[in-house]
Image (cartoon, rainbow, N blue to C red):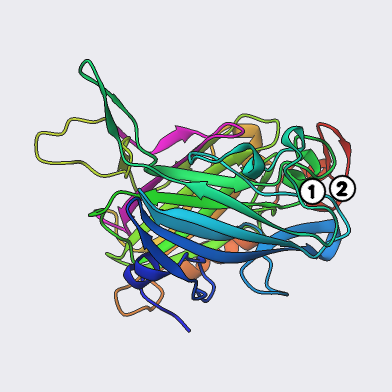
Amino acid sequence: MRVSRRSMLAGTAAGVLAPAVGVAGTASAAGLTRQLTIYAEALPGGLYGYGLEPGKATIPGPLLEVYEGDTLEIELVNRTDKRLSIHPHGVTYDTASDGAPLNASFNKPGETRTYTWRTRTRYDAGGGFWMPGSAGYWHYHDHAMGTDHGTAGLARGLYGGLIVRKRGDLLPSKQYTVVFNEMMINHAMAPDTPILEARLGERVEWVCIGYGSLPHTFHLHGHRWADTRTGMLRGADDNAAIVDNKNLDPGSSFGFQVLAGEGAGPGAWMYHCHVQTHSDGGMVGLFLVRNPDGSLPDGAQDAIDRFKEHGHTGHDLNPDSRTHAGGEL
């Protein structure tokens, strides 16, 4: 069952491009406490993923959303024979929910464990200073498979996006999570990287995440955004920098919203790493902006066909013969 973005945030945690699952929500003085279950599972090819239902694990895992002040209680079910965990960025947690072996916070093979993530609004620290809130585009990942830093888990697909919103934030029509990890995008290389779609004028939210051991930059053709928390300006006098390319190094994340094809029109627009050897090597995907009625714009199919014939040069880094820092998979 598909539900709206607003209803997802009002009463559930959300999975992008997958049916949202209903989760219990209890009110407290600090906000809502939301409970959900995530399943860590083995996937073909020696990969692993997180999913909101048994047998539905994906790479990346589901995109999770809460408002500032809310708490997430995540029951992680380890359906694998590996030690693993779930570790977040950008939110608050105690050592028992760290997801790191340093704090004995992980799931043994077959074990179920609950992790609690809290968020907060900004508050007055006194003396004219304020402590920041949790709002932002964040992410979560394994921190226990292979090494105490989860190197094998990250290399094999155990990661996903996390959004903490301020109440009143503008909600998108579509959302996409894009992960740059070594020489891959969402664990694939061109021409097998995602073709992400929207109709002309639809509000699209991008969540961009970096992992691995290589520096990257994210570039989106035909579109630009403000270098702010949301990618939007706060008013006519907001002079924040406008960008269409941004660093995406390991462990970093950012997000933004655009109106699909605004000022540029419909078409097949590339997104890619702008480190030239990386884009040449297959770190490129397509953002397909359809006509308002959903039809393909002129020339788009030819562009898609050319993309599918993409000849990348990074043959030694294809997903079936990967080596990473920390050893061979």
Instruction: Residue lying at the far front in this picture: please name it.
Output: 29
The answer to whether residue 236 is above or below residue 69 is: above
| Residue at 61%, 66% in the rendered image | 37
Element type where label 1 sits in the image:
loop
Q: Where is residue 328 in the image (x, y as percent from the top left)?
A: 90, 40
Which residue sits furthest left? 236
Query: Residue 321: which numbered mark, if any?
Result: 2
In the rendered structure, which amino acid carries the disc numbered 1? Answer: Asn
Residue 159 at least partly seen: yes
Is residue 269 visible to the viewer in this orientation of the structure? no
What range is drawn magenta here? 242-263
Q: Label 1, on which residue? A: 318
Location of residue 290 by image quarter: bottom left
Q: Estimate how packed mark 2 is, as few (under 14), some (14 to 19) or many (20 or more) residues with alpha carbons within 10 Å.
A: few
Q: How far apart are marks 1 and 2 (CA)?
A: 6 Å
Seen in the picture, residue 227 relative to 286 is either above or below; the reply is above
Q: Is residue 113 left or right of residue 216?
A: right
**x, y (%) of residue 53?**
65, 74
Asked if disc 1 and disc 2 are in contact, CB closer than 8 Å, the reply is yes
Horizontally, residue 233 falls left or right of residue 91, namely left
Q: Which mark is residue 228?
A: none
Q: Nearer the viewer, residue 19 or 271?
A: 19
Query: Residue 167: percent from the left, percent from the top?
Result: 26, 53
Q: What is the x, y in percent for residue 127?
A: 22, 15
Q: Which amino acid does label 2 sit on?
A: Ser
**Residue depicted at 65% across the width and 33% down the height:** 277
In-image side of 310 versus 72 (left or right): right
> Quick check: 160 above or below 299?
above
Query: Magenta stretch: residue 247 in it?
Result: yes
